[in-house]
């Protein structure tokens, strides 16, 4: 047996570490390497030729509420009770909000009290009805099917506001709570350095087991003991302690453990929050993710996505799902808006809620759908708040049955460009392409992409 393998086996037999595999044993080393990558040490030459240029914007951070699967617009923010039960189903009693003349779905009484803080875009459109293509378009502004895979909004913001632009935190600049979105490559041609850090775990659990930061069932003291044992066995590191590469690795390992055991990682520790506030958010994965997002904004993280999975792709029994899920969303999102506002953070934080599309306005009552709604990209609703966007407004409208855009179409590129503007990211700024293609934050005039103009109504 080789010397390093023997040391590994000794470590495997340390109390509490038995049954660990070698990948878990080397956890700290991999995290340290990730820390190096995050700071740009591994950036390819093509990615370093263009320095990011951004001006100070009204917004400093973005919280994206990604409604995976596409929620029904008629059951949430664009109710149509007058269209009849074949369209509204049993949810035919929309409620008034604190903004005169603005009604939303009956399952959102808490958001009805916050309508002055957000605006609704009821004329979102792209005409795509497949999850993959619609997700790509809503999050990049581009159409799929070409030779270039464009980065999504989070990756672009990370490029302009992340480590290469002076971001100093050990917390990655682009975070997804809790699962990767998975429908496309978020980083596109920018490369894996700009992929989001997906936390994994569940913030609603007693301890939020963040991937690579918290190991379930392992205390902080046990982590310290493991680190000490690794250092005792690191004969090569001791012998080459003056080597610059070893010194770099040692430094980044220290930073990695600062995230695991120090103050940086405490941003994920919700036990620091009052029980009353946690209850207001809701003791659900979504509600507690909203609370984590607020804490990340306080730490200066530029982009946070809450990937709100499980339940919005309601082909069957749509209304049963709505009655379960919409109140959960109502509680978490309304508290997030109020909490950001109370802390003076809403003015500098864009919150945007959107799925990849809406749902078919006409209900499929027949078996096997039993009151289901299919995919609908002709018209759907997005919500925006904070970061300089006005609240209490409605942009555009759908027709009487929620089937088509009636006024002021808004394409994904219009919304995305408006968010970039609030962040101070220039529309004509170049993005580095590995093949040297002339690519920019927003498309050139010769790129035939549907757009109807930025959301000037909201700023």
Image (cartoon, rainbow, N blue to C red):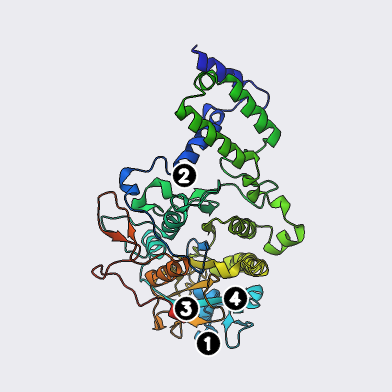
Q: Earlier in the sequence, mark 4 or mark 3?
A: 4
- Pointer 3 residue: 122
**Distance between the alpha carbons at the discs numbered 4 and 1:** 27 Å
Asked whether disc 3 touches disc 2, contact meaning CB atoms under 8 Å apart, the reply is no
Q: How far apart are marks 4 and 3 (CA)?
A: 16 Å
Residue 385 coordinates in the image, percent (x, y): 55, 72
Within 10 Å of disc 1 (Cα), the crowding (few <14, some 14-19, many 20+) is: few
Residue found at the very far front of the displayed protein: 242
Q: Tag 2 or tag 3, which sits nearer the N-term?
A: 2
Q: What residue is shown with label 2?
A: 38
Secondary structure beneath dot 3 equals strand
Label whose residue precedes the other's in the sequence (1 or 3):
1
Judging from the image, what secondary structure is the residue with disc 1 in?
helix
Q: Residue at x 66, y 67 (%)?
A: 335
Please identify, in this view, whether the residue under mark 1 or under mark 3 is nearer the observer.
3
Cβ atoms under marks 1 and 3 closer than 8 Å: no
Name the residue rendered at 47%, 62% in the picture.
69
Instruction: Name the mark nearer the viewer: 1 or 2.
Output: 2
Tell me how far mark 1 sits from mark 2, CA to CA: 53 Å
Give 168 or 133, whichever is nearer the viewer. Answer: 168
Q: Where is residue 67 in the image (x, y as percent from the top left)?
A: 51, 63
Residue located beneath label 4 in the image: 117
Q: Is mark 4 on a helix, strand or loop?
A: helix
Residue at x 59% of width, y 24% of height: 231
* Gap between marks 3 and 2 measured at Cα: 38 Å
User: How far is disc 4 from disc 2 in space, using C-alphas?
Assistant: 35 Å
Q: Do the residues labelled 4 and 1 touch (CB within 8 Å)?
A: no
Circle 4 residues within 10 Å: few <14, some 14–19, many ≥20: many
- Look at mark 1 in the image and give the residue it sits on: 82
- Please tell me whether mark 2 sits on a helix, a strand or a loop: helix
| N-term-proximal mark, 4 vs 1 | 1
Please tell me which of labels 4 and 2 falls first in the chain: 2
């Amino acid at each position: 047996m080789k010397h390093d393998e023997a040391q590994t086996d000794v470590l495997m037999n340390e109390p509490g570490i038995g049954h660990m595999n070698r990948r878990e044993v080397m956890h700290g080393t991999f995290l340290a390497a990730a820390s190096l990558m995050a700071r740009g040490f591994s950036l390819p030459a093509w990615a370093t030729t263009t320095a990011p240029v951004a001006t100070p914007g009204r917004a400093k951070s973005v919280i994206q509420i990604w409604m995976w699967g596409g929620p029904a617009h008629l059951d949430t923010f664009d109710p149509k009770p007058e269209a009849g039960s074949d369209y509204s189903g049993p949810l035919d009693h929309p409620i008034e909000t604190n903004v005169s003349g603005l009604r939303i779905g009956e399952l959102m009484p808490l958001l009805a009290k916050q309508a002055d803080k957000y605006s609704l875009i009821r004329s979102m459109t792209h005409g795509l009805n497949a999850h993959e293509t619609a997700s790509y378009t809503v999050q990049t502004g581009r159409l799929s099917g070409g030779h270039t895979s464009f980065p999504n909004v989070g990756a672009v913001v990370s490029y302009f506001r992340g480590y290469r632009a002076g971001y100093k935190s050990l917390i990655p600049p682009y975070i997804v709570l809790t699962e990767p979105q998975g429908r496309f490559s978020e980083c596109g041609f920018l490369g894996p350095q700009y992929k989001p850090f997906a936390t994994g775990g569940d913030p609603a659990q007693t301890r939020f087991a963040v991937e690579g930061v918290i190991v379930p069932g392992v205390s902080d003291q046990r982590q310290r003991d493991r680190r000490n044992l690794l250092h005792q066995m690191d004969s090569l590191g001791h012998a080459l302690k003056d080597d610059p590469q070893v010194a770099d690795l040692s430094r980044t390992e220290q930073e990695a453990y600062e995230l695991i055991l120090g103050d940086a990682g405490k941003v994920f520790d919700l036990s620091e929050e009052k029980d009353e506030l946690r209850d207001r958010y809701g003791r659900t994965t979504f509600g507690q993710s909203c609370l984590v997002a607020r804490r990340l904004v306080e730490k200066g993280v530029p982009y946070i996505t809450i990937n709100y999975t499980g339940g919005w792709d309601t082909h069957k029994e749509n209304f049963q799902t709505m009655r379960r899920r919409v109140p959960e969303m109502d509680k978490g999102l309304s508290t997030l808006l109020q909490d950001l506002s109370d802390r003076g953070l809403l003015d500098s934080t864009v919150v945007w809620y959107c799925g990849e599309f809406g749902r078919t306005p006409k209900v499929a009552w027949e078996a096997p759908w039993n009151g289901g709604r299919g995919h609908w990209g002709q018209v759907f609703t997005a919500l925006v708040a904070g970061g300089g966007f006005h609240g209490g407004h409605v942009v555009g409208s759908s027709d009487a049955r929620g089937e088509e855009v009636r006024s002021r179409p808004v394409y994904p590129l219009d919304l995305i460009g408006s968010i970039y503007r609030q962040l101070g990211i220039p529309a004509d700024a170049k993005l580095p392409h590995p093949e040297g293609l002339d690519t920019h934050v927003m498309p050139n005039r010769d790129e035939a992409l549907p757009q109807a103009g930025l959301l000037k109504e909201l700023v």
